[in-house]
Amino acid sequence: MLRLLWSDRFAAWGRQRSPGFATADPSRNKAEVIPKSEDRLRLGGAEADFATNRVRAPDGTVTTLRRQTAAVLRALAARRGRNVSKAELFAEVWGDIAVTDDSLTQCVTEIRRALGSARGVLVTVARDGYRLEAEAALPEAGRGAAKGRPTESLEVYELHLRGVEAKHEFTQEGFAEAVPLFRRALALDPDFAQAMVALSITLMFQVDFVPEAEAKAMIDESYALAKRAVALAPDDPNGLLRLACLRVCDGRRDEAWSYAERAVALAPTNPDVLAVAAGCYFFADRGRAPLDWAERAVALNPGHPSWYNIWLAQAALFQGETDLALRAGGEAPEGSADITIAAAEALSGDAGEARRLFDRLRELTRFSNLSDWWWIGDLRADPAYAPWVKAAEIAGLPVTEAEADALAARQGPPRQ
């Protein structure tokens, strides 16, 4: 039976969508040269000169930014590597002037246009704001993407970014919105590896909520997308981590570990890569490495998105650090770490709370037992899952389908 990772299972939680991308077109001049300035910053192959409010893209194209757009870039640059909330940007750039989200979105779009193929250094942080990647991380994190062909189409990249924003809502509605956006991007640029990885991930998020035949087709497509993405960009950490997740699903852990380890080696200071690596390979058979990755991600990005805590909690549980699992799980997006919290509660001695959480998960999903949740025939047969088996036994949760059937038989039919 195919096995899915908890890293491909998020409980749905809601939020309002961010406004769509604007389409401002700043003036551009390929022949212009940015003058020497001390107020200059390199951004993944692009260069910003704050003395002149100009940005030179990797292909040499120079864009003069509007005053507000340059102020947004300056504010982000002053906090490189940190998440900067929309509220902070509104306060710093517009002060007491009341503006809508559209004004900020337009500035961000203009910055990305100006950065050209380096536009990926400006990251949208779901439900928060934006982050300009720290320069120290860019050569490592971006090396793989540079070896694959980045899209040269602004339309394709904006479709991709809109898909990522929808995906990061982590709701079934958001996933359903993201999939056609990624498909449109790939229809226009079939070799855009970033969109392949994003679509591969999003399809796996949907698997538990569709009929089995449709789920099988989604899994097959997710595999094919990940393999093609890595073939196009063999040193892209995100593609490698997608393959690591899928290899764990296949039970090929040695391969999964090699992909995850290589991704971390390529981007050792990229907190997103570290957090996802911990979510893709979380077993304790390689020592403390997955938990170290998760903790390093949090340390590198103190204002990290809450989804980091899903993987931190899970890695902590596999290492037997139940207090950390409970703390991190409690700070994860609502519902997303409930199964980890339930196991940690059981291992900490609160069988009643563990049972309540396990029962709620069984009501909300089609899974009747813990092995079902991990898509494994019998969790007891795999020593790597020993903490989960022990937690289930403490809480009285059936570990296998046979145990679930026996429990249902003892309890009898539900009362009318």
Image (cartoon, rainbow, N blue to C red):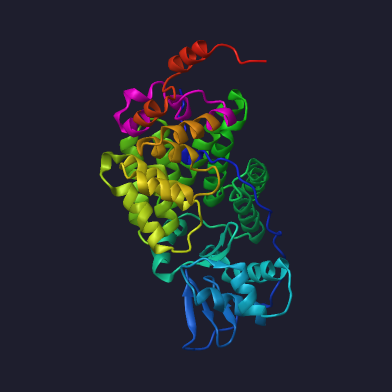
Q: Nearer the viewer, residue 278 or 149?
A: 278
The C terminus sits in image quarter: top right
Q: Quadrant of residue 254?
A: top left
Say whether residue 5 is visible: no
In this rendering, would 21 be left or right of 124? right
Residue 136: x and y in percent read: 39, 69
Give the residue drawn at x 46%, y 52%.
308
- Magenta part of the protein: which range? 361-389
Specify whether residue 132 is painted magenta: no
Q: Nearer the viewer, residue 117 or 347?
A: 347
In this rendering, would 109 be left or right of 384? right
Residue 290: x and y in percent read: 33, 47
Q: Quadrant of residue 315?
A: top left
Specify whether residue 388 is painted magenta: yes
Give the residue drawn at x 30%, y 43%.
319
Q: How many marks?
A: 0
Residue 182: x and y in percent read: 62, 47
Give the residue drawn at x 41%, y 28%.
395
Q: Main secondary structure of the magenta part?
A: helix
Is the residue 416 above or below the residue 128 in the image?
Answer: above
Give the residue drawn at x 61%, y 16%.
414
Residue 409: x and y in percent read: 51, 10
The N terminus sits in image quarter: top left
Say whether residue 164 is visible: yes
